[in-house]
Image: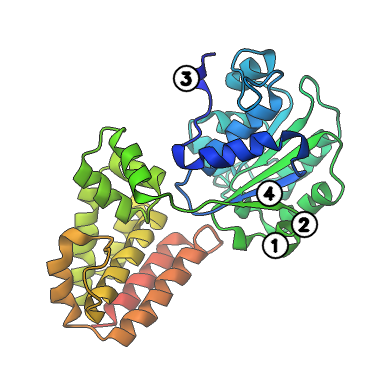
Amino acid sequence: MTTQELPEVHPWNASKAAALARDRKRLPHALLLAGPAGLGKNALAAWLAQFLLCVQPAAGDKPCGHCQGCRLFAAGSHPDLHVVQPEAIYKSTDTLIARYALRYPPTDKNKDSKDSSVIRIDQIRSLIENAQTRPQIAACKLMLLSPADTLNVNAANSLLKLLEEPPPDSYLILVADRPARLPATIRSRCTRVDFNAPAKDTALAWLRSRDLSESDARLLLGLAGGAPLAAQLLAESDFLAQRAALLEDVERLVGGQADPLACAARWKSLGAERCLLWLQGWLSDLIRTTMRTGPGQLHNPDVQTRLQALEKRLDLRQLFRYADVVAQGRALLGGPLDEQLLLEDTLIRWMELR
């Protein structure tokens, strides 16, 4: 394994990695890495896991990449790293962390049921059972839950056992895009590390290093709410072309020229989270344009003329109320409510504004 194959610490998270490395001997038992998606939380969690499992960290502040611990980590077979993810996530992502999560499948489910989108209690029970053993190779045992905010109620209650009675020589790392979904009893027992959008210049430089043009990098970063990794994913999925269809949908819906049910089905195929995040940013642009707040930063600066044409047809108070509808819809994603129904309700209520 070479240094280039180590988990990447993104430039905007380098100071966090350095601080955690300095405090290696004083790290709390439980860490909560919290913040919006696309900021590199999982990458830092993987880096920290390897750092803590490394036998001889290079220069004391990064994994060496050559010891037995680092080699086993890279092979996806380190016996002291335990990862729990929802079944739907580890089956659909090709990452090293997802490879570790294969060890903890949900067992208490029907064979014909769809892949679970939550972390279930049987997964946590298996984790607790294995956590009681001593580390096999490393000086400690690592337990990583991502995204931890997908814990269902019973699983969250079961996890409290690990937090209240941590096994010796163990660390628990929780990664959460929506930490408010975690019970207060869990959040209060973790040391929180907050992740925020990096400085724009830093994010743009990183995106340009990924072969994006300056103009595309700026536009995609705005569409991603300032999250560089989310912007990169948008670029890889050709979201700028998809956005054109979304924009046409919202314009036709408010004019009564489109079917909200058909639009919702199309949006679901593109990803409900991605589409509602875009809608939230676009709606913010529309409110800013309606209020005539000046040339502030827009998420969609290239469609300002179309925004100006639309704002003449809508009431500002209605837009603010609808902004709450979209925010509530995003908050419900990942829960028991069917995404198709959620999108249908959101778009029907947008159509009713006309």
Question: Residue, x 28% and y 65% (percent of image)?
Answer: 282
Q: CA distance from mark 1 to mark 3?
A: 38 Å
Q: CA distance from mark 2 to mark 4?
A: 11 Å
Name the residue that disc number 3 marks. Answer: 4
**Mark 1 crowdedness (10 Å alpha carbons): few <14, some 14-19, many ≥20:** some
Q: Quadrant of residue 210?
A: top left
Q: Is residue 214 above or below residue 263?
A: above
> In terms of sequence position, does the residue under pointer 2 or pointer 3 come before the other?
3
Q: CA distance from mark 4 to mark 3?
A: 35 Å
**7, 119: nearer the viewer:** 7
Name the residue that disc number 2 marks. Answer: 157
Question: Residue, x 21% and y 62% (percent of image)?
Answer: 247
Name the residue that disc number 4 marks. Answer: 120
Three-letter residue code for mark 3 = Gln
Three-letter residue code for mark 4 = Arg
Question: Can residue 271 be seen by looking at this rendering?
Answer: yes
Position in image of residue 164 (x %, y %): 85, 51
In the image: residue 17, left or right of residue 238: right
Find out whether the residues at labels 2 and 1 contact each other: C-beta distance under 8 Å.
yes
> In terms of sequence position, does the residue under pointer 4 or pointer 3 come before the other?
3
> In terms of sequence position, does the residue under pointer 2 or pointer 1 come before the other?
2
Mark 3 secondary-structure assignment: helix
Name the residue that disc number 1 marks. Answer: 183
Three-letter residue code for mark 2 = Asn
Question: Residue, x 83% and y 50% (percent of image)?
Answer: 161
Position in image of residue 338 (x %, y %): 48, 62
Q: Is residue 334 above or below residue 313?
A: above
Q: Which mark is nearer the camera, 2 or 1? A: 1
Question: Can residue 233 be seen by looking at this rendering?
Answer: no
Mark 1 secondary-structure assignment: loop
Find out whether the residues at labels 2 and 3 contact each other: C-beta distance under 8 Å.
no
